[in-house]
Amino acid sequence: MSALFISDLHLSTAQPDKLEAFNILLNDIGSQFDSIYILGDLFEEFWVGNDDITPPNPEILAILKSTTESGIKVFFIKGNRELLLEANFSDITV
Ligand SMILES: [Mn+2]
């Protein structure tokens, strides 16, 4: 059993290279792990709800979805950027 822990990526459209690195981390390197723990502040902009499709939210959600669909368990602990994130967040990432 192995786990990958990441935190404070603060992903935004201002840093597309970091967004691509996140994709590689989860969907290539992440395949070596049973579970991935995201320990807050995945987003740079404050999370305001599942219906916010402001970039890069759709890209980030697609990365999370493809990771969970591959069978890796992804756990998310809210950071201050995600204070409004609710339990139904998993509805759009699983
Ligand atoms: Mn932070």
Image (cartoon, grey):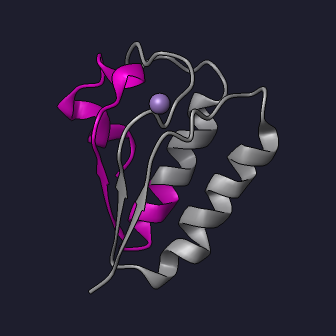
Note whether 31 is above or below 37 in the view shown: below
Residue at screen point 67% across, 29% down:
12
In the picture as drawn, the residue positioned furthest to the left comes out as 87
Residue 75 is inside the magenta segment: yes
82 left or right of 18 in image: left
| Quarter location, residue 21 | bottom right
Visible residue check, residue 50:
no
The quadrant in which the N terminus is found is bottom left
Is residue 26 in sight in this rendering?
yes
> Which x, y percent locates residue 49?
37, 17
The correct choice, above or below, for 94 with respect to 43 in the image is below
Q: Provide the residue span drawn in magenta.
A: 65-94
Identity of the residue drawn at 45% across and 46% down? 7
In this view, the residue in front, 92 or 6, is: 6
In the rendered image, residue 74 lying in the magenta stretch gets the answer yes
Write down the quadrant of residue 33 in the picture. Answer: bottom left
Q: Where is residue 13 in the image (x, y as percent from the top left)?
A: 74, 28
Residue 81 placed where, x, y %? 42, 21
* Residue at (63, 40) in percent of width and height: 59
Asked if residue 7 lies left or right of residue 2, the reply is: right
Percent across and percent down for residue 85 are 30, 24
Residue toward you, 68 or 77: 77
Q: Is residue 42 above or below residue 49?
A: below
Give the residue displayed 67% in from the left and 64% down from the top: 24
Nearest the camera: 68 or 3?
3
Identify which residue, 21 or 54, lies in the foreground: 21
Left or right of 88, for residue 7: right
